[in-house]
Image (tube, rainbow, N blue to C red):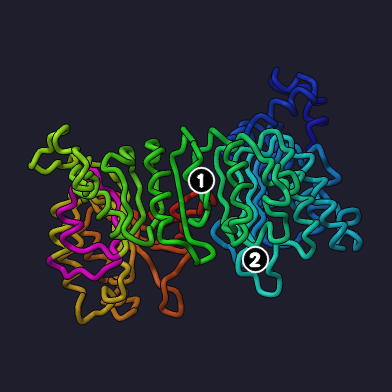
Amino acid sequence: MSCILLKQSGNVPPLFRLPDEILEEIVSELDQHRDLVAFALASRICATMVIPHHTQYRILRVRHTFPDMWAHLARRSDLARNIREVHICERSNTWAPDRYPVTLIDKTLDGALENAEESVRIRNICLALSHMHLLHTFTWSWENVRGQAWPTSNPGHEKSILTVISQRPQLRHVALHGKFAMFILGSQRDPESKTYPVWSLANLKSLSLRGEAWASSKNSLHLRHLLANCPDLESLEVPMEFNHLAECRLPNLKKVKLEMQAGVVDIGIDRSRSLFLENHPTIEELFWSPIGAPFIAQDALPNLKSLCTNQRFIAALEDADSGAHSIGLMTPPSTPLTTVIPISDEPIHAPPPIVRHIENLDIYGVARVALLHSKILHPDSLRRLRINSLEDPATLQEIAQTFPNIEWLSLCHPQYYNPDVYDRDAWLDVLPRFRKLEVFRGLGLWRASYNDRQKMHECILDLVEACPRLRVLDRINKYNEADEHNQIVITRNGDLVDYRYQKKPSRNPFDIMNGLFD
């Protein structure tokens, strides 16, 4: 029954006696899907109002061309205006479910053949995006696509779409992953950064740029111009090769990811990256592996809580003597410096490194001593730990004792999958030592069970008894390889214990750890 008929029945709450235009504005203020569902469950008239006119028009995530859908959104501005997020992805990107409107698409108007023509489809995309005045998030991922390296067949189409995006007044979060900006003018020919719409973005909270063009030196000044327009930025992912990073000042920055894109950099780049980190003590999450042995101040990153790096960076943070400056520099014999300024024979020591309350940690190639005797880690703070190097059972026991609050553990070195080294009994001895363990990542248990489902079933039953808090394990697919999208979820109801397969959580495109600690 339509809203009109329900109103004519006379038996409606006072709220729905308001004019339709006001009711529509009230419901349009509901951002979250769960709030729309809760509103729909209140009554039949509530459900009629929001399903599907609002429930299908908040988040748009597509992996296909869908010309009929874009034609529908271009034609129905009253529906498109309520969309808050748009995610355009390559077909292989399955880290989150597809979401797009279906019910109200007109097969005759929207499904017309001319809408499938590429220039018409792009025009409809631009028109649909122009209706989305409440759009706050836009992501476009086009990585490793066979047969079409660039996100659009015509560079002008890419520019047209991004021009509309740059004009959205509420836009706060942008991610562009892939071969974007491949045919644009460098800063020498475009010194004011006017010819590409991305450079005009402003007031962003999150920015993620991944691809060769963002790493190009000719675009470095453009990128600096973009960051200068976003002083309130909180999350940033840019290529490690970005030359002018050290010049940027972002006082609210909390998340940083610096990853190599082009593959050719000067080893001296580590110092400028370290300087950027020193200038941003607000950083809480960092994804960066330096090329060489960087120098960084001992009091840098005092608020760090999540870290993915290599052993070189940890050594730089812990080496307190690396910051000491020598006063006894060589001077010509004729310089009477020593007669004016007495020089102490006692060495000058740098202050000890500060202890950071890091909760999530992934250090590639970390050695046993470096982890167990780290001077920068607070043992009680560590909650999630990923170990990439091989450690024997005795070392894992020491780790469990040193870091008593570990809840999430990933052991992904291939040697952990050798049943001759780590058999079923070894796992059942090591894992219960992590007394607060809730999530265990890795295929060690499966390999110890020789990928046999029945043996793994028995192993899980023994493990849940020994680890009373355990709730998630990895699983294998039909090819006996790691299942990237599903996991084993353990449920407890009193003395009853059960487990089932369940999809892994959807990945946030602005998670700089890329789901590493999920």
What type is the residue that disc 2 sits on?
Arg
Q: Which residue is mark 1?
A: 236
Nearer to me, 481 or 301? 301
Measured along the vertical axis of the image, is residue 186 above or below residue 250? below
* x 79%, y 50%: residue: 160
The crowd level at tag 2 (other Cα within 10 Å; few <14, some 14-19, many 20+) is: some
Q: With 410 as the anchor, is 146 left or right in this view?
A: right
Tell me where residue 257 appears, x and y as whole percent.
Answer: 46, 51
What type is the residue that disc 1 sits on?
Leu
Q: Residue pushed farthest left? A: 345
Q: Which residue is mark 2?
A: 91
| Residue 220 on the magenta span | no
| Residue span colored magenta | 365-394
Measured along the vertical axis of the image, is residue 17 above or below residue 504? above
Of marks 1 and 2, the one in the foreground: 1
Tell me where residue 75 appears, x and y as whole percent.
Answer: 86, 45
Please identify the quadrant where the C terminus is shown.
bottom left
